[in-house]
Amino acid sequence: MHISEEYLKELVLRILKELDGNNRQKIYMICLDSWRGEYEELLKQLRDSKEYYVCTVIPDDWKGTEYERRLSAFGSCCQVIFRSQANPCDLEQSISLFPIISKDILSKTALCISDTYETSWIADCMEAGGRIIFLRSGIPRFSGREKPAYVNRIMSYYRQVLEYGIEICSHEELKSGRMFQNESVCSAPSPQEAPKSRKRIITASNVESLASDGILYVQPDDIVTDLAKDRAKFLNIILK
């Protein structure tokens, strides 16, 4: 039976895509004590993601409640974890995502205080060398009535957590997998416009869209999966 080169190419690309689906990166979505609609919104945004799958970390008193059922209903939520369980051992390979960031979490993270569940999780991630992301939409806003000294102190906390390597991105940047940009952080991040992050994860599902004129420029901090390299080679895309 004769198989055309075009059909064979399409078949290989389809297999690579399916294999890459098994290499999606895990996200631990950390929920605070109080329910927020942002948790459902994030799972909705990642419903068709080819980059990630989500393990939702929730308070124990949500077990068996409407909150747990609503989160579990999303296809993007592959697992629900309760706070009483031990922190996972794969924090180094995963993303710890905080859809909501309170000023308490921000300040304690900046000051290396880990006396709450959230800040203890962040400390464990830091020690494991894992990645932490704060969603830009979950950053608290200033009221406009604060004293300048207070605003300056809060801004210094943002600068500090960014120096720790914590990333800040929007829903769109997270969903597209392109929030990791190689650009330096200049001034202090503001709750209205937080700076972008520094790395990209290049997979078989996005290698073609990231390339331009057959060339994909890879920055030193970028992560390129083996399947992305295979697909780039198959498509004659040069990684530079």
Image (tube, helix red, strand yellow):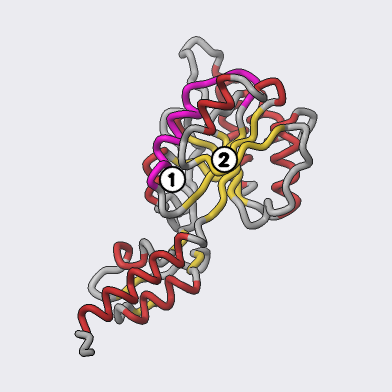
The secondary structure type at the circle numbered 1 is: helix
Where is residue 14 shown, x and y percent of the image? 34, 69
Q: Is residue 218 above or below residue 85?
A: below
Instruction: Report the quarter where the C terminus lies.
Output: bottom left
Q: Is residue 159 visible?
A: no
Q: Is residue 91 above or below residue 20?
A: above
Q: Please tell me whether mark 2 sits on a helix, a strand or a loop.
A: strand
* Image height of 167 relative to 101, above or below: below
Q: Is residue 219 left or right of residue 91?
A: left
Q: Which residue is mark 1?
A: 174
Instruction: Mark 1: give few (<14), some (14-19) or many (20+) Cα within 10 Å.
Output: many
Q: Is residue 89 rendered to the left or right of residue 154? A: right
Quick check: is 207 in the magenta stretch? no
Residue 140 spot, x, y in % from top left: 52, 23
Q: Is residue 201 left or right of residue 83?
A: left
* Residue at image point 62% right, 40% down: 161
**Image location (x, y in percent) of residue 107:** 67, 29
Check disc 2: other Cα within 10 Å, few if <14, some if 14-19, many if 20+. many
Q: Does the segment drawn in magenta span residue 40?
A: yes
Tell me the distance, in whole angstroms, between the alpha carbons under discs 1 and 2: 10 Å
- Label 2 sits on residue: 97
Residue 18 quadrant: bottom left
Tell which residue pokes out farthest to the top in this image.
145
User: Which span is picked out in magenta?
Assistant: 32-48
Cβ–Cβ under 8 Å for marks 1 and 2:
yes
Q: In the figure, residue 218 lies in which quadrant? A: bottom left
| Sequence order check, earlier mark of 1 and 2 | 2
